[in-house]
Amino acid sequence: MKLGRLNHIGVATPSIEDSITYYRKVMGANDITEPFDLPEQGVKVCFVNTPTENGMNGTQIELIEPFDDASPINGFLAKNPAGGQHHVCYEVEDIAEARKWFEDMGKRILGPTRIGAHGTPIFFVHPKDMMGQLTEIMETPKEAH
């Protein structure tokens, strides 16, 4: 397995709309996607796009808000009512190879491989196995090549 680029940093928020306002007014962001629902993941999502450099895509900030009372990020927001950094996401070329790599090292995978917000396969690795950081592994989108 070979580690790819940092695709995004996930930021949990009690309000995507308030967070969009913050990123626009405080951080000067002007490229923010429209929020959309991912009910199968239990979240509403949008992406703050950072500038591109030398033809490379910038890292995104993924804003995630609970979709409903069963959302997996409700516990995080209960401990962090203002929201905050939730996870980091790295790209890999082959999601099945990456999953096997982590499993062979005894890392705890949280749930099945599934389709994430970018439309590509993802899985999460337990923060206790990743230096305290919830880590999303996602297959590099094919259109990125």
Image (cartoon, helix red, strand yellow):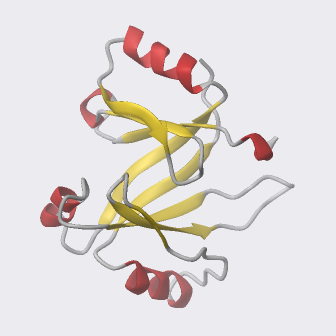
Query: At which x and y percent is residue 50?
Result: 65, 67
Q: How many marks?
A: 0
For the residue pair 130 and 78, the one nearer the viewer reads as: 78
The C terminus lies in quadrant: top right
Identify the residue at horizontal 46%, vertical 38% (top origin). 114
Image position, residue 63 (x, y; %): 44, 67
Q: Quadrant of residue 140?
A: top right
Depth order, front residue of 34/59: 34
Nearer the observer, 11 or 97? 97
Which quarter of the rendered picture does the N terminus lie within?
top right
> Vertical placement of 70 versus 145: above or below?
below
User: In the displayed structure, would residue 14 be above or below residue 37?
Assistant: below
Nearer to me, 113 or 60: 113
Res. 19 image quadrant: bottom left
- Locate residue 81, reporting x and y percent: 18, 72
- Residue 141 is left or right of residue 40, and the answer is right
Picture quadrant of residue 90? top right
Residue ID at (60%, 84%): 28
Name the residue at 24% across, 58% down. Answer: 71
* Residue 20 spot, x, y in % from top left: 48, 82
Residue depicted at x 19% and y 58%: 70
Q: Residue furthest right?
A: 54
Left or right of residue 119, residue 43 in this image: left
Residue at the extreme top of the image, as rendered:
104
Considering only vertical position in the picture, is 59 above or below 91?
below
Q: Is residue 116 above or below residue 106?
A: below
